[in-house]
Image (cartoon, rainbow, N blue to C red):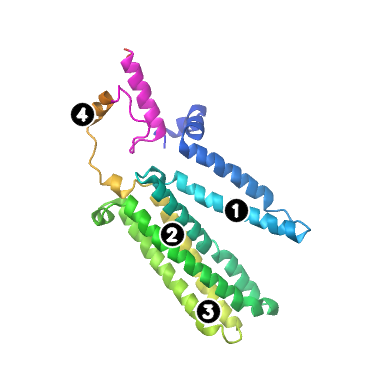
Amino acid sequence: MSGLSLANAFSGTAWRTVLFETDFGRAWQLRLGLIAVAIALAPLRLQQDHLQSALKLALWLVGIVLLVSLAWVSHAAAAHTQPLGLLGDALHLCAAGGWIGGLLPLTIFLATARVSASLTAHAPRVLRRLSALSLCCVSVLVISGLSNSWLLVGSVRALFTTRYGALLIFKLALFAVLLGFGARNRFVIKTKLSAPTRSDLLSQLRRNVIYEICLGVAVVATVGCLGVTPPAHLGSAPTKTPASTSKRRNRSGGRLPDHPRHLDPLSIQQLNTIADNQKQGHNII
């Protein structure tokens, strides 16, 4: 992010600049604080039911804010249509968290229900509720994903000619397979859960959910790669020449704009320092 060597990147000046003088750093201050709150609250077990319910609600809200705050350190935060991009990214993150994040607890429930008669009796109701939630989350994912793709890719050509576009296509392929497993599970739930629930049916559902978790992890890993790859509309942009950079610097009084799209905050600060020194007649070696 800073363009510095690994040793210099961990110097006091570098990390203080990133943490306290950039939007990225301020967003991570919030995230680190919320993570600390979640770690402190999660182990608590309160005696009164209403207090325990309030604690669960607080943890749920912390989780939502943690998800939404990722939008402020994503490509959407730098898009020229920022409010729409942030809203779409926030909805996308919440929907992904609701769907993918619910698969692990569902796997644990299905494994436990196989050996517990009381849980087996509740399995149809739990599975129908989770199926409805997953359908809502997938709908939001598709709509917000189309919006984000339009903002960050820009054209069909960029989808096939840039690294960002290739990663996005790979992510969409994984998502399609994930949808296939989800559709199969929904079909099983709607057609076979009307009869008394059998342990072999729960085992089949658990196996499919485990496949979904593996695909979900692959999708999240691909999203991580997308996060460190320049968006397609930037990757396909014409390269800036030294002459054009010089003209822009002269028009702005020797300083670069505060938020040029292609430069990170530390590079901007360094270049502006050089420009100021040159303006004052100092030699930069």
Q: Which residue is mark 2?
A: 219
- At mark 1, the secondary structure is helix
Circle 2 or circle 4, nearest the eye:
4
82 or 123: nearer the viewer: 82
Circle 1 or circle 4, nearest the eye:
1
Q: CA distance from mark 1 to mark 4?
A: 50 Å
- At mark 2, the secondary structure is helix
Circle 2 or circle 3, nearest the eye:
3
Q: CA distance from mark 1 to mark 3?
A: 30 Å
- At mark 4, the secondary structure is helix
**Is residue 65 one of those drawn in magenta?**
no
Q: Residue at x 35, y 60 (%)?
A: 170
Circle 1 or circle 3, nearest the eye:
1
Residue 249 point in image, percent of width and height: 28, 26
Q: Earlier in the sequence, mark 2 or mark 1?
A: 1
Q: Residue furthest front?
A: 83
Q: Which residue is mark 1?
A: 61
Q: Amino acid at mark 3?
A: Ile
Q: Residue at x 39, y 61 (%)?
A: 143
Marks 3 and 4 close (CB-CB < 8 Å)? no
Q: Which residues are magenta?
A: 252-280
Q: Residue at x 52, y 52 (%)?
A: 67
Q: Earlier in the sequence, mark 2 or mark 3?
A: 3
Q: Which residue is mark 4?
A: 243
Residue 122 point in image, percent of width and height: 65, 77
Q: Amino acid at mark 1?
A: Leu
Quick one: label 2, few (<14), some, or many (20+) residues within 10 Å? many
Q: Which residue is mark 3?
A: 189
Q: Quadrant of residue 258?
A: top left
